[in-house]
């Protein structure tokens, strides 16, 4: 017998994504030198249309923010398959016309590179191939866009197999931002 208890005082904000990066990650630093890495992840859903019998596919894009991820950022390159675990955070800002814009990002707690060197992952899958922020609290007032400056980005040398184009059909035109 299964018993359920409803606890009104608790809530869950948890996101798990497995997908491919749409472009290289960008790292910037806050005024207090905290690294903020941003990237977008494409996830696909495929289903069979009940009326036509045709297979259809839909791609969703998620913006991901990774705090203090400078050690993994050089490996977060376009086409890399990643596992992202984190939480949703909605923020607002004023655009160039003064209009309030709302955006929802995934604030990553864990990022793990998936796939081997020849599978578009760009790195191995050993235990040190990811970044975890468990127990890390984002500094007050250190959200995205607050006092950040861009940093030069070094990129690891890619193996010839890693430079082969991905066959997932993702192009620069698919990236929403």
Image (cartoon, rainbow, N blue to C red):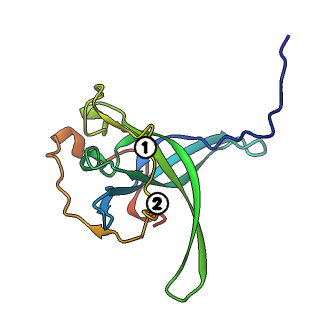
SS assignment at label 2:
loop
Residue 173 can be seen in this image: yes
Query: Residue 113 location, x and y as percent?
Result: 35, 37
Residue contact between numbered discs 2 and 1, judged by CB atoms under 8 Å: no
Looking at this view, is 134 or 126 the one in front? 134
Image: 150 above or below 136: below
Q: Is residue 117 left or right of residue 80?
A: left
Residue 23 can be seen in this image: no
Q: Residues within 10 Å of mark 2 (few under 14, many from 20)?
A: few
Mark 2–mark 1 Cα distance, whole angstroms, equals 12 Å
As drawn, the label of residue 170 is: none
> Which residue appears at 32% of the width and 60% of the height?
26
Judged from this view, the residue extending furthest toward the bottom is: 97
Residue at label 1? Answer: 136
Q: Residue 40 lies in what quarter of the image?
A: bottom left
Please identify the quadrant where the N terminus is shown.
top right
> Which residue appears at 29% of the width and 70% of the height?
149
Query: Residue 90 location, x and y as percent?
Result: 60, 61
Query: Residue 126 location, x and y as percent?
Result: 28, 25
> Which residue appears at 83% of the width and 15% of the height?
2
Q: Residues within 10 Å of mark 1 (few under 14, many from 20)?
A: few
Image: 9 above or below 89: above
Q: Residue 14 lies in what quarter of the image?
A: top right
Residue at label 2? Answer: 140
Q: Is residue 101 left or right of residue 172?
A: right
Judged from this view, the residue extending furthest toward the top is: 1
């Amino acid at each position: 017998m299964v018993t359920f208890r409803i606890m009104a005082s608790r809530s869950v904000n948890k996101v798990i994504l497995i997908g491919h990066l749409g472009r290289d990650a960008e790292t910037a630093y806050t005024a207090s030198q905290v690294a903020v890495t941003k990237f977008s992840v494409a996830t696909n859903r495929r289903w069979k249309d009940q009326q036509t019998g045709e297979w259809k596919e839909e791609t969703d894009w998620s913006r991901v923010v990774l705090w203090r991820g400078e050690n993994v950022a050089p490996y977060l390159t376009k086409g890399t398959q990643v596992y992202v675990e984190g939480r949703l955070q909605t923020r607002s800002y004023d655009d160039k016309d003064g209009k309030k814009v709302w955006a929802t990002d995934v604030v990553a707690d864990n990022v793990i590179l998936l796939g081997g060197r020849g599978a578009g992952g760009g790195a191995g899958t050993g235990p040190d191939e990811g970044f975890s922020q468990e127990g890390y609290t984002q500094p007050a007032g250190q959200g995205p866009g607050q006092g950040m400056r861009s940093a030069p980005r070094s990129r690891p040398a890619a193996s010839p197999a890693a430079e082969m184009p991905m066959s997932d059909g993702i192009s620069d035109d698919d990236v929403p931002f």
